[in-house]
Amino acid sequence: MDFFAQQARVRGSSRRLVVLFVLAVVAIVGVIDAVVWFTMGHHPAPGEPARSNLPLLLASTLAVLAGIAFSSLYRIVSLSGGGKTVAEGLGAVAVPPDTDEPSLRQLRNVIEEVAIAAGVPVPDIYLLESEPGINAFAAGFSASDAAICVTRGCLDNLSRDELQGVIAHEFSHVLNGDMRLNIRLMGLLFGILVLTVIGRQVIWFGGGRSNRRDGGGGQVWMIGLALVVVGYIGYFFGRLIQAAVARSRESLADASAVQFTRQSDGIAGALKKIAVLSEGSELQAAKKHEVAHMLFGESEAFNALFATHPPLMDRIRALQPGFREEELAGLAESMQRAAEAPPAAPATPKPAGGVPGVPGMVLPPVLPPVLPVVLAGAAAASGPAAAGFQRAAAVHQAMPAALSEAVRQPESALAVMLALALSLQAELQPAQRRIVAEAFGDDMHQTVQTMVGALEALPPIARLPLVAIAFPALKQLPEGRQQTLLDTLDALVKVDGRVDLNEYCLARLLRLQLQEARQPRRTPIDGLKKLPACRDSVILVCTIVAAAGCSDEASARRAWLMAMQNAFPGEAIEWVAPPQAWQAPFESALNDLDGLMPEAKELLIQSLARAIHADGMVSVEEAELLRVICASLHCPVPA
């Protein structure tokens, strides 16, 4: 997925949206000022001295601007809870983490696999239960507060590959910054539409004064009517802006879904079923107009002017150039036959061994020995993006069932995170156990010890993916308990006076993502800096990555030089070994690099990949460090 190019395009869409919105507001202010001048301004009779209407027009302009600005700000602030606020406002319900319904389990598995592949935390998952049409959307200010919502029609009508294509499409919106733009667009449209509400109140007020002798009621009534008319006209043009901005981004999201999954049949199949089904992608929700630009498909039948998506046939042909519309009839017949066929008997689950001390949690047959074979097969079978996606699926399947279930509930997810931070060195464990007991009590200490046993079956490469799956549950912990978790992790990893790479990656990733989830609107936006402006930070981060993946300084220097040649070609830069206390300078450098523009971030990630691949292999430590760096820069992990 060309995340960086898309992010640059979205930034261009944001600028274009601001310009169009400002023009719409200027036009609205001009019309309202004209009506106020006509109805309430001073129009001198012949021989009568003229008085300035400037104070009146200035008051009118300020009142309209304040009304639009405060209304837009109010709506955006009301959505500050992130993606879940948008989903619940539309009537969606959260998908339970322990659901037994097969279609919901499949949905959760698909979303978790895509999140692991992208290197982002698993989003909140919502379902529009009463919607038979095929549709979905992603909402939120960042990946840490994202929510993905699908309709019941998606689950009832789509195959796993088709559902995967739809989810990959929505993840592209999560990754490239569309969600923040979408929420702002909701606020701006609300700010324009609120003028009609104010106008109705003014009309009512003016009508109440119409019987007064001063005749002022008629003037107020005319101003109210103007507000209503201009508000609706402004909303009309706002919808045009909404549609224009959304159409270009939806085409990019379709292409990104194909790049992500490396197959076009899934998303194309979903679009074909939208074309065949009578419900299509339509929504019944009352607020569907507000989220129309977020959806996978059109929320209702639009003319071309208001369409938030390219025409359905155009989207299908872009994915499958040889497709003919006549083929939809055959698809409709096959779907009809499938609907009339008797349901297949459910498979009988095989018994599995339990985990001592954890009732209801079971472990599948141990998978780590076959995981390297699966990963190698994924890499050989297809290109890098497809291999990355298949690796994610293999890692997801290799997670012990006990741990997968444990990280879906807040308290047990907390216990797993603490267990991941415990050292394998026996001499350090008594001190670490005391830290856990003092922070959370003896009961949590016992649960953590049980989780330590379960973690023995977890492949090392699955450590941080397990954190991604645990994230929705960890967000549900009270803020104070989250902070205690982060403080305890810091104490655990420093108990021996040093911080190794694995311990650092766990603590840094959780701290970054939990803090952003608590304050989603403060998530950094795209920076404007170029790579030379952050030269020292680039050098330090590349140095630490090169040293982490090499056993000796000579190898680390060679890997570092490969990164430097990619980042600053032709420049002579002297190698300096990483400092002993590297964590604080490293975090400061990451904060600096997060201010880079998307193209500069792309070059940096390419340089880091050069250093990691210098010895022809990727260690677990390198993979985890790169995942943390990408999370800090708010970009996906490269395939």
Image (tube, rainbow, N blue to C red):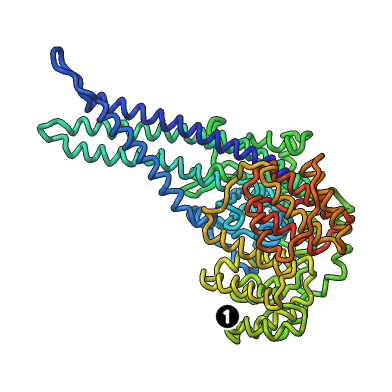
Seen at 83% across and 49% down, the residue is: 561
- Evaluate whether residue 223 shows in this view: yes
Q: Amino acid at mark 1?
A: Ala
Q: Quadrant of residue 327?
A: top right
Does 190 appear above or below 465?
above
Residue situated in front as seen by the camera: 14 or 597: 597
Residue situated in front as seen by the camera: 321 or 416: 416
193 relative to 536 in the view: left or right:
left
Does 418 appear above or below 206?
below
Residue 158: x percent and y percent? 69, 52
The quadrant of the image that shows the N terminus is top right
Residue situated in front as seen by the camera: 268 or 343: 268
Q: Please count the marks in the image.
A: 1
Q: Which residue occupies the extreme left position in the image?
A: 213
Q: Quadrant of residue 578?
A: bottom right
369 relative to 112 in the view: left or right:
right
Seen at 64% across and 85% down, the residue is: 434
Residue 270: x percent and y percent? 69, 46
Q: Which residue occupies the extreme top position in the image?
A: 46
Label 1, on which residue? 439
- Evaluate whether residue 130 shows in this view: no
Does 368 appear above or below 574?
below
Residue 316: x percent and y percent? 71, 38
Please tell me whether mark 1 sits on a helix, a strand or a loop.
helix
Q: Quadrant of residue 296?
A: top right
Residue situated in front as seen by the camera: 284 or 524: 524
Residue 586: x percent and y percent? 69, 59
The residue carrying pointer 1 sits among few (fewer than 14), some (14 to 19) or many (20 or more) residues within 10 Å by Cα, namely: some
